[in-house]
Image (spheres, rainbow, N blue to C red):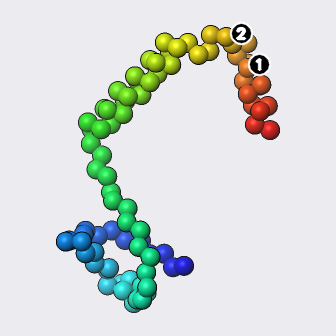
Amino acid sequence: MLAVEFETHAKNGTIEIPEKYRAMVEGELKVIILKKEKKTKMSEKGKITQLKKLLKQIREKNIFQTIDDPVEWQRTIRDEWT
């Protein structure tokens, strides 16, 4: 399958294929649309706020309180991967 990537703008539900690709993409096509998301400072701040909130919840649950030897605990966890 041939893959061609380019950026364009949709106008009334129509996209234009750039001239240099038109001959290559004649006939039946499979189209996948990926919409670009705009990153804003507010959304980044929101992500940071959410991350801080989650870390606070983890800290409050004190999920590592039962670990006496952190190094041994890590070895045990890694052994599960093999």
Q: Amino acid at mark 2?
A: Asp
Disc 1, SS: helix
- The quadrant in which residue 20 appears is bottom left
Mark 1 touching mark 2, by CB under 8 A?
yes
Q: Is residue 49 positioned above or below 37 on the image?
A: above
Q: Which residue is mark 1?
A: 72
Residue 14, disc: none
- The quadrant in which residue 23 appears is bottom left
Quadrant occupied by the C terminus: top right
Q: Is residue 23 positioned above or below 76 on the image?
A: below
Question: Residue shown at 55%/12% (left/top)?
Answer: 62
Quadrant occupied by the N terminus: bottom right
Question: Residue shown at 32%/36% (left/top)?
Answer: 44
- Residue 22 image position (x, y, % from top left): 36, 86
In this rendering, would 61 be left or right of 28? right
In this rendering, would 50 be left or right of 12? right
How packed mark 2 is, by other alpha carbons closer than 10 Å (few <14, some 14-19, many 20 or more), is few
- Residue 13 image position (x, y, % from top left): 24, 71
In this rendering, would 26 be left or right of 15? right
Question: Residue shown at 48%/75% (left/top)?
Answer: 3
| Distance between the alpha carbons at the discs numbered 1 and 2 | 9 Å
Residue 68, disc: 2
Q: Amino acid at mark 1?
A: Glu
Question: Residue shown at 26%/36% (left/top)?
Answer: 42
Q: Is residue 45 positioned above or below 26 on the image?
A: above
Q: Which residue occupies the foreground of this view, 60 or 25?
A: 60
Disc 2, SS: loop
Q: Is residue 43 positioned above or below 58 on the image?
A: below
The number of callouts visible is: 2
* Residue extending farthest left: 12
- Residue 41 image position (x, y, % from top left): 27, 38
